[in-house]
Image (cartoon, grey):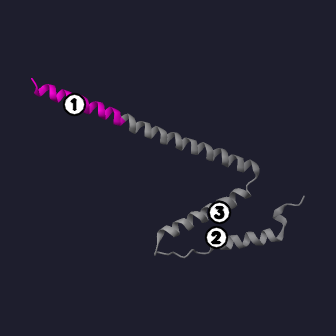
Amino acid sequence: MNYPQDDPNVKRRLEELEAELKQPQPVSSSSSSPNFIETVKTLYNQFLVWFKELPKLGQAAIVVVGLAMGLTLLRTLAELISLAISLAVVGGIVYIGYKIFKSSKFSK
């Protein structure tokens, strides 16, 4: 059976990519925003290369774990928003109760 890893071109390209990864990246202190964007793009491309090298079962597992983590993050965010709204409502009720109690105490 002929695997793609046996191809000399694939091995040569893999060695080139490894050499690129091992090269130190120049640090530019002039502007951090483009550097950050380039770093994110590089990390994303490295992730894609790593992901595509995984077997189909591994790719499926990564997708399932990623979806589970994403849904958990969304659920946590929704709970935090719900908590903030609940605290605002309770705070409003306490404030109104305080104002009513304070005004009824001075009217006596």
Residue topped by disc 3? 46
The residue carrying mark 2 is 21
Comparing marks 3 and 1, which lies closer to the viewer? 1
Give the main secondary structure, helix, strand or loop, of the magenta stretch.
helix
Residue 53, horizontal then vertical, whole percent: 73, 58
Residue 5 sits in which quadrant?
Answer: bottom right
Judge whether residue 88 is colored magenta. yes
Q: Where is residue 12, by image quadrant?
A: bottom right
Q: Is residue 68 left or right of residue 95?
A: right
Mark 1 vs mark 2, foreground winner is 1
Residue at 71 percent across and 50 percent down: it is: 59
**Highlighted range, magenta:** 87-108
| Residue 98 marker | 1
State the quadrant of the C terminus: top left
Q: For numbered disc 3, what is the local secondary structure?
A: helix
Residue 64 image position (x, y, % from top left): 66, 44
Residue 49, x across and y down, in percent = 69, 61
Tell me the kind of residue under disc 1.
Tyr
Mark 3 vs 1: CB contact within 8 A: no
Q: Residues within 10 Å of mark 3 (few under 14, many from 20)?
A: some
Residue 64 covered by magenta stretch: no
The Cα–Cα distance between marks 3 and 1, rounded to whole angstroms, is 58 Å
> Residue at image x 53%, y 42%?
74
Q: Is residue 6 left or right of residue 46?
A: right
In the rendered image of this protein, does residue 42 appear above or below residue 92? Answer: below
- Say which element carries label 1: helix
Considering the image in quadrants, where does the N terminus appear? bottom right
Residue type at numbered disc 3: Gln
Q: CA distance from mark 1 to mark 2?
A: 64 Å
Q: Earlier in the sequence, mark 3 or mark 1?
A: 3
> Circles 3 and 2: CB distance less than 8 Å?
yes
